[in-house]
Amino acid sequence: MPVLRYVAAGLRLAGLQYQRRYNRLHKSIYGLSYDLHVLNSCYDVISIYCSMNFLFSNLVRRQLSLRFPLFYTDARNIPVSKLQLCISCLDLFCSILVVKQLHQYRKTQNINQGVSYLCLITIASSLIFGVFTFACSTLNLPIDSGRFGVFYLEHVNYMWVIGTLLSSLKLFPQVTLNWSGMCTQGLSSKYVVLTLTSELLEALGMAFFQHQHWFEIPFNFRTRYDLSFNIISLVCILYQAQYLYLGAKRRLPRRKRR
């Protein structure tokens, strides 16, 4: 199961590299969702933040062992995958490079492209909530306490949930962008196929080869809900690219630059 998971991660990173190559060769990002790669970058940042806390924060590890003494008898035995943390860092690096291209080739975007208000509101709300829970759990308080029942462990858990939600929904903007433009130009077919294969392999490993109890699974592994939503979205994108809008020309005009 770990082998499948890391092969899947390699395919996902390769898919991002193919998307970068596609953008560079065409010198265009027409039809590529800004929200997808911005949300993916935000998810990676949150995943790294939570992983670092579970790995290195004595406060988080102590609170976790005190709250679940039957499962985590020793604060040093909290399951966190260091390799998964490295993968998240690589994924963030590749995502930032794609976001850089979105800015570099911004003159080629169509009228429906750009970071949406909904995406900005979601990110801003997540940031405000994260700062609020951090303040409730740390500022002017003794260790192992929190305002409104929000301990530091809750803060990290809330951020993990937010990151999982962002990752689950990140591909929906690309589906809707394809639908509004009635074409899939701008998406690398290799990116779609490799990313879908990656998600299926990870889901397969989780379904058939994971014999661990739930409390033995590393905290920074992805969830089945995240994988399910992404697989559904990628199947929709593949259907759009290979059947619904196959051979379709660009319909939406480019955004006028001031």
Image (tube, grey):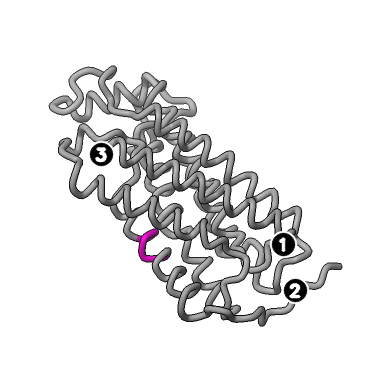
Q: Quadrant of residue 78?
A: top left
Of labels 2 and 3, the one closer to you: 3
Q: Which residue in the structure is indicated by mark 1?
A: 28
Magenta segment main secondary structure: helix
Q: Quadrant of the C terminus?
A: bottom right
- On the image, the x and y values in percent for residue 128 come to 53, 47
Magenta stretch containing residue 231, yes or no?
Answer: yes
Q: Which residue in the structure is indicated by mark 3?
A: 1
- Name the residue located 52 percent from the left edge and 73 percent from the top edge: 176
Mark 3 or mark 2, which is nearer the start of the sequence? 3
User: In the rendered structure, which amino acid carries the disc numbered 2?
Assistant: Arg
- On the image, the x and y values in percent for residue 240 come to 48, 75
Nearest the eye: 93 or 139: 93
Helix, strand or loop for disc 1: loop
Q: Which residue in the structure is indicated by mark 2?
A: 254
Q: Residues within 10 Å of mark 2 (few under 14, many from 20)?
A: some
Magenta stretch containing residue 6, yes or no?
Answer: no
Question: Above or below — where is 234 with respect to 124?
Answer: below
Q: Residue 242 got which mark?
A: none
Q: Quadrant of the N terminus?
A: top left
User: In the rendered structure, which amino acid carries the disc numbered 1?
Assistant: Ser
Mark 1 or mark 2, which is nearer the start of the sequence? 1
Label 1 – label 3 distance at C-alpha? 38 Å
Label 2 – label 3 distance at C-alpha? 45 Å
Q: Residues within 10 Å of mark 1 (few under 14, many from 20)?
A: some
Query: Can residue 58 be seen here?
Result: yes
- Name the residue located 47 percent from the left edge and 34 percent from the top edge: 49
Q: Which residues are magenta?
A: 229-233
Q: How many marks?
A: 3
Mark 3 or mark 1, which is nearer the start of the sequence? 3
Label 2 – label 1 distance at C-alpha? 11 Å
